[in-house]
Amino acid sequence: MTRRVVITGLGLVCGVGNTAPEVWQGLIEGRSGVGPIQGFDTTGFPVTFAAEVRNFDPLNFVDKKESRKMGRFTHFAFAATAEAMAQSGLQITPENAERVGVFIGSGIGGFEIIEREHSNMLSGGPRKLSPFFIPAAIVNMAAGFISIRYGAQGPISATATACATSANSIGDSVRMILHGDADAMIAGGSEAAVTPLSVGGFAAMRALSTRNDEPTKASRPFDKDRDGFVIGEGAGMVILEELEFARKRGAKILAEVIGYGMSADAYHMTGIAPEGAGAQRSMRAALKDAGIAPDEVGYVNAHATSTPAGDGNESKAIELVFGERALSKQLKVSGTKSMTGHLLGGAGGLEAGITVLALQNQILPPTINLDNVDPECVLDYVPNVAIPHSFDVALSNSFGFGGINATLIMRRWTE
């Protein structure tokens, strides 16, 4: 019997909200999660805003002693996983523990821990370093801590593929289930990179928007006046299960993951290949994996970071893959980073969850701040206002530095 993979739970944390319902409500209202940075003094920084997670207390998810051993990215992963697990109703028991795995990635890991401990060493020498420095900072510890918390003893990994990270985590988890190595996976990504070194570094490479006087309007995918991305933080997690495993325990199914594609640009360390050639290959690979025609896709949640080169090339890639369906604007495309900011390694998990919610609700979240569409971007980007839309299949793109591309395709669950 052919194995199939379904999503039974999701958890989201970002600047728009701290739970999936909060995030979804904010998105369909077109509400920006971007504002002046509160986490550190931005005096002298060329960029002073971000999409920070607000009103977040890690002690709602981990006890105080354990919390001190973790980076903020792990706190976010705990919150999103707790929400996803509660929705799924999945119980990990001694009988099934070896069949449940964890793939949780991060692009950077505990950046704030690295900065803090480096400062401690400079001021007081190596004896001032915390014994928890390394475990709190390294990328794989969100996956490690969560496997311990829930007792998941199956496959475990931590992807680190920049901004494709959590899409790869989800796609690779799907393949683990399809291959028979697991019956369920906790999968996604988390990031907490709104820190001085991170914001300063991305600003130094001129990747960030500098619209300091209008932070809520700074992320503007496909707009001709876009000038860079807005850094965000948070996590997106899904519970993936083999269909019969989920059915046997009476789980409510949210969507089915039917396709996963990857590709390399092999072009530039931070730039995107002309006409999104790598993105085209990734989308075509996902369509082939799903066994569907391009015309069956009704919505694309675009990577759409609001960078001058990135959005135009992704739009062209979508145009070339989907052809007349895209040009006639039957295919809808939107960039939700216009509201959430860019979660880097957490982006693909967040956007996979958003895509599932769009399928469930048959509503498309908008691309806000799209006031003057770039003449080279000729598709329907759901400008500024959410719209109802009848569709059964959706695609989500995630692209990372190094020319790494990942695409997920999900189908609405109607059985």
Image (spheres, rainbow, N blue to C red):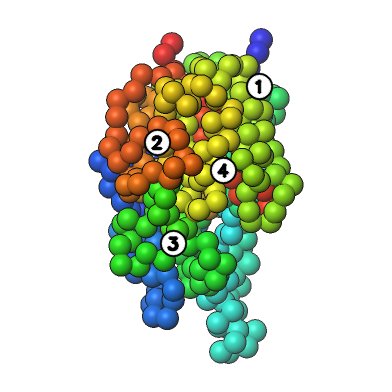
Q: Is residue 325 left or right of residue 218?
A: right
N-term-proximal mark, 1 vs 3: 3
Callout 2 amino acid: Tyr
Labels 2, 1: front one: 2
Relative to 300, is 373 above or below?
A: below
Relative to 46, is 397 above or below?
A: above
Which residue does the numbered mark 1 point to in the structure image? 288
What residue appears at the point 47 percent right and 26 percent down from the top-left corner?
Answer: 327
Q: Quote the CA–CA distance across marks 1 and 3.
A: 36 Å
Q: Quote the CA–CA distance across marks 2 and 1.
A: 25 Å
Q: Is residue 322 left or right of residue 392?
A: right
Q: Please give the label number shown on residue 209.
A: 3
How packed is label 2: few (under 14 Cα within 10 Å), some, or many (20 or more)?
Answer: many
What residue appears at the point 42 percent right and 54 percent down from the top-left corner?
Answer: 226
Q: In what element is the residue under mark 2?
A: loop
Which residue does the numbered mark 2 point to in the structure image? 381
Callout 1 amino acid: Lys
Residue 86, x across and y down, in percent = 40, 36
Residue 311, x across and y down, in percent = 50, 46
Residue 96, x across and y down, in percent = 59, 29
Q: Is residue 210 left or right of residue 245?
A: left
What residue appears at the point 25 percent right and 41 percent down from the top-left corner?
Answer: 29
How packed is label 4: few (under 14 Cα within 10 Å), some, or many (20 or more)?
Answer: many
N-term-proximal mark, 1 vs 4: 1
What residue appears at the point 66 percent right and 10 percent down from the top-left corner?
Answer: 1
